[in-house]
Image: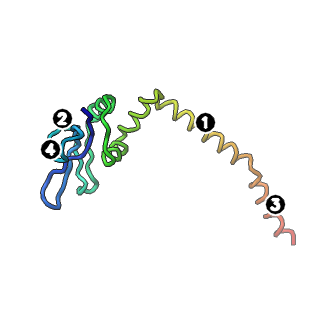
Amino acid sequence: MTTRIRLRRMGSNKRPFYRVVVADQRSPRDGRFIEIIGRYHPLNDPSVIEIDEDRALDWLRKGAQPSNAVTVLLRKVGVWERFQTEKTGQTPATSSATTATSKTSTTTQNSTSPMPEATASEDEEPAAP
């Protein structure tokens, strides 16, 4: 049985809200499902995205494939990044340490540039005549 994490449309005409469900791939969009793991209200301002992160990660580990819309929601909540780092075996602290070293190298390059000297010599030239 192939499982998918997808949206199930609820609500009245022109007032939709969605439940994030885990369902068999063969079942219809609003048909039978296995588990509700969240909800999405796009019409609220700002839109409401509530996903049970533990259950979503558990289903992703089991091999459930998210739909395109659910992948976007998982990225906004941060679950997809947690799953990808867990899948590759990296820790979030390792990736932030490499970012910090690259920021340090760019600030070093900016401090050694000859720009301040050039502006000082330009100020002296108009004062001489």
Q: Of the residues tagged 2 and 1, which is closer to the observer?
A: 2
Quarter of the image with the N terminus is top left
User: Residue 101, which numbered label?
Assistant: 1
Q: Earlier in the sequence, mark 4 or mark 1?
A: 4
C-alpha distance separating marks 2 and 1 = 45 Å
Of residues 28 and 88, the one drawn nearer to the viewer in this rendering: 28
Residue beneath disc 3: 121
Q: Position of residue 18 (x, y in %)?
A: 21, 49
What is the C-alpha distance between the residues marked 4 and 1? 51 Å
Looking at the rendered structure, the kind of residue marked 2 is Ile
Image spot of residue 60 (x, y percent): 32, 33
| Amino acid type indicated by mark 3 | Ser
Separation of marks 2 and 3 at Cα, in angstroms: 74 Å
Q: Which mark is residue 31?
A: 4
Query: In the drawing, does residue 48 fall left or right of residue 122?
Result: left
In the orientation shown, which residue stands out farthest toward the top? 89
The label nearer to you, 4 versus 1, is 4
State the CA–CA distance, disc 3 to disc 4: 76 Å
Q: Residue furthest bottom?
A: 129
Tell me the SS state at disc 2. Answer: loop
Question: Of residues 68 and 42, which is closer to you in this image?
Answer: 68
Q: Amino acid at mark 1?
A: Thr
State the separation of the CA atoms marked 1 and 3.
33 Å
Give the camera-side residue of 37 and 61: 61
- Residue shown at 38% from the left, 33% from the top: 83
Q: Quadrant of the C terminus?
A: bottom right
Q: Are marks 3 and 4 in contact (CB under 8 Å)?
A: no
Which residue, as the protein is rendered here, is positioned at the far left?
Answer: 12
Q: Secondary structure at mark 4?
A: loop
Lateral position of residue 95 relative to residue 119, left or right = left
The residue wearing badge 2 is 34
